[in-house]
Image (cartoon, grey):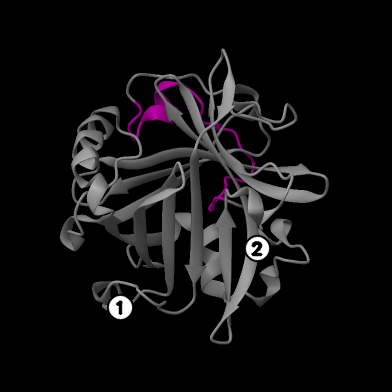
Amino acid sequence: MAHKSAIPFSRLPSRWRIGPDFFTRIEAIDHHHPHPPTGIVDNLTAYASDNCHIERLVPAIRAFYENTQTQMLLIYPEWHRLFRWPARLYRFFSRRSGQMNLPLLPDTANSRIKSTIIPLLDKLDGRENVRGWIRVYEATQEAVYVAAYATHFCDGTAYMNIAFPLPPGNLTSILHLTTFEQDGDTNLRLSSFAASNPGGDQGVYLSTKWFTIRLPFNEIIEVFSMPYEEMPAVMSNGNHEVFARHRVWLFGIHFLTLHYGIHESTGR
């Protein structure tokens, strides 16, 4: 499927190996940034709309987005049984490429994730106010995700524009934000589905120097201030302040759910 030509896609150069030092190797870090970012967004109110009531969110949810580098994540994966063997092959390549290196099993002892936020050069990336979010497993320092975050606006709507560098180019997830109520709490939803905002930019794209296409992937990330239904029991243990559920579909088939427990790191 073709993409809208107005969508700004990252122009970061591709490499066969990504890894946690990717932005250093491609000389993408803005070492002279006057106000280095601490979160994947500076102020979440940029996404406020009639369907996205940022002011109702608890401070801990906003802190996760606005002060991301102080947050510790615990990840718990649930792969659909039909995808467990393909996931093993995927994991073989993802570990070697150092990108989107998701765990196969809910091994909580090795699933603690640390975050680093760094300012990136807008001129090199092509988008505005770009920052990198590097997530690594605390125990091994292997990369989980290496991504460049930005915000773009179209017809008055703000979109979270996330580029994951890959060998052929960038996998870009463009998400539309809304809030929803549950048990008296206001929670945040980020979605790539077309139904989230009909006619909008949201979607998952592969962008290369030769072409850009929309992929048959979709994802929904829901961020909760309280434990949610179907959350793994182990995630309720600990001092988590925020909980997140990240669901992913391929050709309309739900194949993976990632559960997160999130709290501020005392070691920062």
Instruction: Report the Cα–Cα distance between label 2 and label 1.
Output: 25 Å
Residue 122 falls in image quadrant: top right
The residue positioned 54% from the left and 58% from the top of the image is 65
Q: Quick check: 156 left or right of 152? A: right
Percent position of residue 98, x then y: 30, 33
State whether residue 82 is above or below residue 257: above
Magenta-colored stretch includes residue 133: no
State whether residue 237 is above or below residue 120: below
Q: Quick check: 65 left or right of 89? A: right
Magenta-colored stretch includes residue 21: yes
Compare residues 253 and 34 and report the one nearer the observer. Answer: 253
The residue positioned 78% from the left and 66% from the top of the image is 50
The residue positioned 72% from the left and 45% from the top of the image is 200
The residue positioned 76% from the left and 62% from the top of the image is 49
- The dominant secondary structure in magenta is loop
Amino acid at dot 1? Ser
The magenta-colored residue range is 18-40
Quarter of the figure with the C terminus: bottom left
The residue that disc 2 covers is 178
> Mark 2: which secondary structure?
strand
Residue 212 falls in image quadrant: top right
Amino acid at dot 2? Thr
Residue 229 falls in image quadrant: bottom left
The residue that disc 1 covers is 236
Please tell me how many numbered marks the rendered image carries. 2
